[in-house]
Amino acid sequence: MADISDVALLKRFRRAEGWLGGLLGEYLLGRSGQWKGAYRVRLVDASAVNRPGKHQSDLRLHVGLDLATQRIDSMELTDVRGGESLERFAVRANEIVIADRGYAHRSGLTHVVKAGGSFIVRIPWNNVPLENRQGERFDIPAELEQIDD
């Protein structure tokens, strides 16, 4: 389509951040009708907040976003010691919670499962000990090796 180096293309993408975000937003809005049904998909994350004149974070804003409605459905403001945990969010049955690795804690993941939900969280395989339904150790690398190509 174009004779351009990968570096030049990357620079153009960086300058087009707002435009690409707008395109993605429109795409998601167009597909939002397809997401209604048996599952609720929800993004959760937290952001550090600095009070005016402060140079270090002293507050943390925890936010949940319902993808079907494109609306924030939960917010909690804590001090900086208020860590990222899925336990901060009320989870429904048949809900899929998507979070970053800051939420990869056994207690929070258990909270989601006990509520009847599911999670998509980047988990360091050696950081969170997982178990199967029988309470036995779930060995992620061993299970991945058993997948057929």
Image (spheres, grey):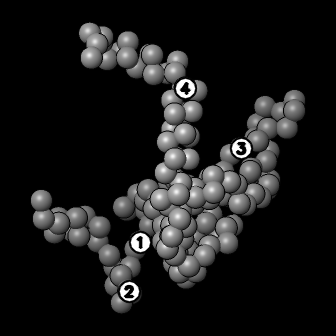
Nearer the camera: disc 4 or disc 1: 4
Screen quadrant of the C terminus: bottom left
Residue drawn at x 43%, y 59% is: 123
For label 1, count other residues whose C-alpha is less than 10 Å away and answer few (under 14), some (14-19) or many (20+). Answer: some
**Cα distance in 3D space between marks 4 and 1:** 41 Å
Q: Are marks 4 and 2 in contact (CB under 8 Å)?
A: no
For label 3, count other residues whose C-alpha is less than 10 Å away and answer few (under 14), some (14-19) or many (20+). Answer: some
Position above or below: 143 against 70: below
Residue drawn at x 67%, y 72% is: 90
| Secondary structure of residue under mark 2 | loop
The disc, 4 or 1, on the residue closer to the chain's N-terminal end is 4
Three-letter residue code for mark 2: Arg
Nearer the camera: disc 1 or disc 3: 3
Three-letter residue code for mark 3: Ala
- In the picture of the structure, the residue carrying the numbered disc 1 is 129
- In the picture of the structure, the residue carrying the numbered disc 3 is 48
Nearer the camera: disc 4 or disc 2: 4
| Secondary structure of residue under mark 3 | strand
**Cα distance in 3D space between marks 3 and 2:** 36 Å
Q: Are marks 1 and 3 in contact (CB under 8 Å)?
A: no
